[in-house]
Image (cartoon, rainbow, N blue to C red):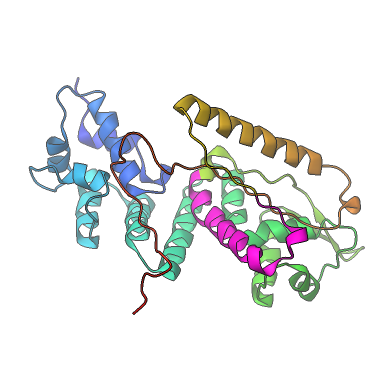
Amino acid sequence: MELSFKKASAEILPSGFTNHREYLKALYDHIRNQRKRYSYVRFSEELGLGSCQASRVIILGQRRITEKTAIKMAKAIGLRNTERRYFLEMVKANRSKDKQEQEDNVAALVNFKRDLATTPEVAKQLFLFSEWYHGAILELVRLKESVHTIEWIREHLQFQVAPKKVEESLNMLQEAGYLVWNVKTYRFEVKQVAIESLKEVQQVAAVGYHTEMIQLAKDSIVQVDQNNRFIISATVATTPEMKKSIFRDIEALCDKIIAASDGDPRKKTEITQVNFQAFPLAASQAPSLHWKRKTKDEGKS
């Protein structure tokens, strides 16, 4: 029996993705694997776009989706409630060119994902990775010399955070079960450590959390003393197998660093952020979609 469009749509959900093109491609591939002679023209028809190649052009990033088209597609797919709102917000986030609007849309994606969380642990981690300073505050209060007041925490963060944001973070960290206030010592007790994102959290968390960390890393180049930071990079030619090996090596090194940080927090004196990245710059086969990057001279009159 041939897989119906509605059934396939129920098996591949938007909340598993952070890019609408990847979601649509996954949905198309899922149907095509089980339907003979399934085409992008047929996929476009079932998405309510008419008998054309529109779905392929959208997936390749050669055409932007308007809000009206996104609503039409969500209805055709059969998306409802939070999954529908998540899809529409995902389209909006990838369509926006304004940095602040992009950040707002990413925050909305994280909130929707939290509503769809399969376990309490996933929901807690989605909160933790929603802002860079949540993890920094959690680690900071573990230090022996730390003073557990809003003002002290704010003053000892490397980058400025408003007092209200620090207070909200402490409250949410308590609600999530990461911190417990000890009325006898007037200090927080950390109940969970070694922060590393769960597989279900990684995709949506990466969009906001890692984008913010990359921006902080850029700021640190000019704001942090060179003796207190370390930067290294390499541009190399690889095979697909080599690239996967690099990913595994980076993951292993990250695990090693996290393991080394375990132990008595009273011996620690500072919080260090360690970022790893690996992404394509060029290939022998031309990419179907070229990323747009704002140059230094762009926008100058």
The reply to whether residue 130 is in sight is no
Taking the spot 69% from the left edge, 53% from the top edge, the residue there is 273
Q: In this view, does 171 lie above or below 114?
A: below
Taking the spot 86% from the left edge, 57% from the top edge, the residue there is 269
The image position of residue 19, as x and y in percent, is: 37, 48
Q: Is residue 95 above or below residue 281?
A: below
Taking the spot 57% from the left edge, 49% from the top edge, the residue there is 123
Asked which quadrant contains residue 221, the reply is bottom right
The extreme top residue here reads: 1
Taking the spot 74% from the left edge, 72% from the top edge, the residue there is 154
The image position of residue 43, as x and y in percent, is: 17, 38
Which quarter shows the C terminus?
bottom left
The image position of residue 254, as x and y in percent, is: 68, 39
* The residue stretch that appears in magenta: 203-231
Task: From the viewer's perspective, tell me whether residue 84 is left or right of residue 236.
Answer: left
User: Which SS does the magenta portion mostly show?
Assistant: helix
Q: Nearer the viewer, residue 267 or 201?
A: 267
Task: From the viewer's perspective, tell me whether residue 231 is left or right of residue 67.
Answer: right
Was residue 124 drawn as part of the magenta stretch in this picture?
A: no
Task: From the viewer's perspective, tell me whether residue 63 is left or right of residue 174.
Answer: left
Which quarter shows the N terminus?
top left
The extreme left residue here reads: 51
Task: From the viewer's perspective, tell me whether residue 108 is left or right of residue 177.
Answer: left
